[in-house]
Image (cartoon, rainbow, N blue to C red):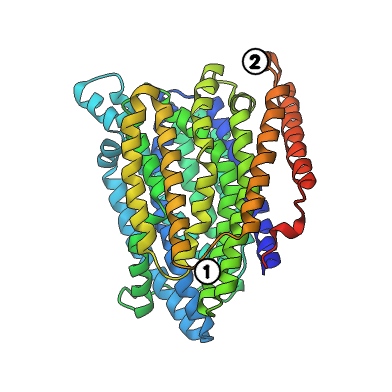
Amino acid sequence: MSRKLLKSGVIVSFMTFISRILGLVRDAVIANLMGAGANADVFLFANKIPNFLRRLFAEGAFAQAFIPVLTDVKNEGDENHLREFIAKVTGSLGVVVTIVTIIGVIASPVLAALFGTGWFIEHLQGGPKGAKFELASMMLKITFPYLLFVSMTGLAGAILNTLNKFAMAAFTPVLLNVAIISCAIYLSPHFAEPAFALAWGVFIGGLLQLLFLIPFLIKANVLVKPKWGWNDPDLIKVRTLMIPALFGVSVGQINLLLDTMIASFLGTGAISWLYYSDRLLEFPLGLFGIAIATVILPTLSRNHVSKDSKSFNNNIDWAVKMVCFLGIPAAAGLFMLAEPMLLTIFQRGEFTPLDATYASHSLKAYSFGLLSFMLVKVLAPGFYSRQDTKTPVKFGIWCMAANMLFNLILVWPFGFVGLAMATSLSACMNALLLYVTLHKQGVYQASSKTIWLLIKILFSSGLMALVIFKVNPEITTWLEFSLLMKVIELTKLVVAGGSVFMISLLLLGVRKRSFIAV
């Protein structure tokens, strides 16, 4: 089974890789256009709120609740029942999200005041940052409908994933990135505030994502006429599972929103620095963690339905080994190359070397939590696939409270970097709680081979970091490099580090069979 999972994971990772590369291009365009100034803060703020809700209504809590129930219905073998269930979920989700979207557009000033409290207070007092609140209120009216488009895209993607068709849904973020890049280049000159062109890019990109998946739904014979079915027994089951999952799966996003609220009280640039560092963190997280989690949930749901506890344990073990193999060296690389990467990718136009330096501090803080972020992605399906959403939500609430406590402790001595440190600490706590509970329930226990593999990966990653530290040029030298030289030097460092890591693992006896479930 792990070979099938690996094949599916590679497909999703490849599509995600294309999306993430374009995402970095998009962020480089944004950095060039607006840097880390006030307009950048406002756009990133206005984009973050619908993205947070996307995690609730689309690929986050909804998918975690919907896929196990859809797997149950699909395994009954009644195609009419399957199509009826999809029709009712589509109609009910569509109505709810449409209402939320309309409310969000109308109440955009309230949302801007709630999550940009610092700007709102400045607005009331007539301070200079008050203009950010007004801009955010207007921009939210453009970006908020993205929630509707991406939620229906998430539904379509969940259906296709359950049918083992992973590539199409994984490709859709490419369209969003293309739309934002195109609007930044061709539409921004027509606006007094370039950020509005980016907001329209979000709107257009969301619509394109939804339209792209419709032909694949038709081909799979699952495109149905939406129906209202709020009280349908299967939909009630989805609702019951989804309500606690809203917190459990989205605790990281909630923490990021709380960080944004606190950052609005800090100086101009804090939100942007956190954003650019988070974007680099999201590259390995999406490429490896989310890709593996995407393919593991339908598989674990089938294992649970067939009562195959051995395969259930082995498949989680495979996912844990894969995220450790990919996530630990990625975290070490992000920490060691934080400033060179930010200088290479973003430092041009309005994005200054000082911005890169500040963003590198928060990226280093985030890198400590990368493995935990990835482990949460693959351990949480161990609960959701068994239709247990209460346990992760309990841990999610604890970790959200802990994150706020960490924020209060760390923000004063470390500023915006303290917010990143707090997010990483709460992620570590979440991953630990999920693993310990799965272990106590007898659902998953890491094998001795997995523990030894983890030790070898840690050693090899440390050796890789040491080599990078020794050969990495001084930052003053990086500042003197041309863009081409930065790209060449960064590529050399990545290749050198990756080679040391892989050679070390081979010398320690790690082989392909080490990652196959038994």
| Image x and y of residue 72, in percent | 48, 78
| Image x and y of residue 410, in percent | 36, 29
304 is higher (above) or lower (below) than 400: below
Helix, strand or loop at mark 2: helix
> Disc 2 marks which residue?
479
Q: Is residue 194 visible?
A: no
**In the image, is 515 to the left or to the right of 225?**
right
Q: Nearer the viewer, residue 230 or 304?
A: 304
Residue 159: mark in rendering: 1
Are dots 2 and 1 in contact, CB under 8 Å? no
**In the image, is 142 to the left or to the right of 476?**
left
Q: Nearer the viewer, residue 248 or 78?
A: 248
| Image x and y of residue 112, in percent | 30, 37
383 is higher (above) or lower (below) than 347: below
Instruction: Tell me the amino acid under the disc marked 1.
Output: Ile
Mark 2 or 1 closer to N-term? Answer: 1
